[in-house]
Amino acid sequence: MKRVAIAFCCLVCVLSGLREAMAFNFYFGEAGTPGVDEVHIGSTAIVIPLGNILLARKDSEYVAIKFTKFWAENTTEVGTVFVSAGSDLYALYESYCQVDKTGDFSKSNVQVKKDKLSNTKPRGIGRFALSFGRDEIECGNIKLLWSGEGSVHFYHRGQPMGDYGVELSPTKWMDISQVNVFDPRLKWYKFDTDGTRRRVNIPIN
């Protein structure tokens, strides 16, 4: 009887860990996973391909974000009592912030930041399982949640999902010198408050 009780507790812990691990899988909905040259337009986030620039703006502040590397470590399909199934996710990114709010990234006063993001699978037992990492993109005064690969959410960690005035625009540009935030071809997206925007994958070009 004691062995059965121990086995049951272990099973509960593993299942709890698996539920936590699912949070690391970005939800693409009916659109499915985008190709390497496609951008995913979701209701809560945009997923940009590696190397392409994603623009963000809030009020009169403009920033640019580019991912330079994605990778995963410690990938397991089956969780244990202490470690959930899934992968530890990492990314390198660059962010550019124009402090004078003109949106002109050719000026010398552009603030450039290069940093590493991490989103690790939960470790621990049951409700005491914790995930450690740095999953917030910092661009001047704008901070945005990251959840793996090229995903950028319309809000930052600690905020309930919602519209906080942040708009995102995916671009085909790969160098900051190409960026023109006032290009009429840009399409700006906001958080899908009413849930009517269909999830789609579109060619980055």
Image (spheres, helix red, strand yellow):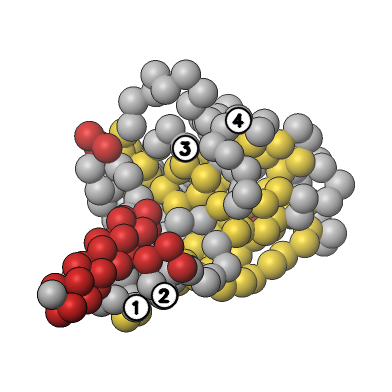
Give the residue type that dot 1 points to: Phe
Q: Is 50 placed above or below 115 here?
A: above
Tell me which label, 1 or 2, sits earlier in the chain: 1
The residue that disc 3 covers is 44
Observer able to see residue 181: no
Tell me which label, 1 or 4, sits earlier in the chain: 1
Say whether residue 171 is left or right of residue 201: right
Q: Is 188 placed above or below 129 here?
A: above
CA gap, disc 3 to disc 2? 29 Å
Please tell me how crowded label 4 is: few (under 14), some (14-19), or many (20+) other residues with Cα within 10 Å. Answer: some
Please tell me how crowded label 1 is: few (under 14), some (14-19), or many (20+) other residues with Cα within 10 Å. Answer: some
CA gap, disc 3 to disc 1? 31 Å
Tell me which label, 3 or 1, sits earlier in the chain: 3
**In the image, residue 139 lies at what x, y percent?**
69, 55
CA gap, disc 2 to disc 4? 33 Å
CA gap, disc 4 to disc 3? 9 Å
In this orientation, which residue lies closer to the viewer: 91 or 94?
91
The residue that disc 2 covers is 124
Q: Residue at x 82, y 42 (%)?
A: 101
Q: Which mark is residue 163?
A: 4
Q: Nearer the viewer, mark 3 or mark 2?
A: 2
Give the residue type that dot 2 points to: Gly
Q: Nearer the viewer, mark 3 or mark 1?
A: 1
User: Is disc 1 placed on a helix, strand or loop?
Assistant: loop
Label pair 2/4, CB-CB below 8 angstroms:
no
Q: Residue at x 46, y 68 (%)?
A: 128
Label pair 1/2, CB-CB below 8 angstroms:
yes
CA gap, disc 1 to disc 4? 36 Å
Label pair 1/4, CB-CB below 8 angstroms:
no
Q: Which mark is residue 82?
A: 1
The tally of labels here is 4
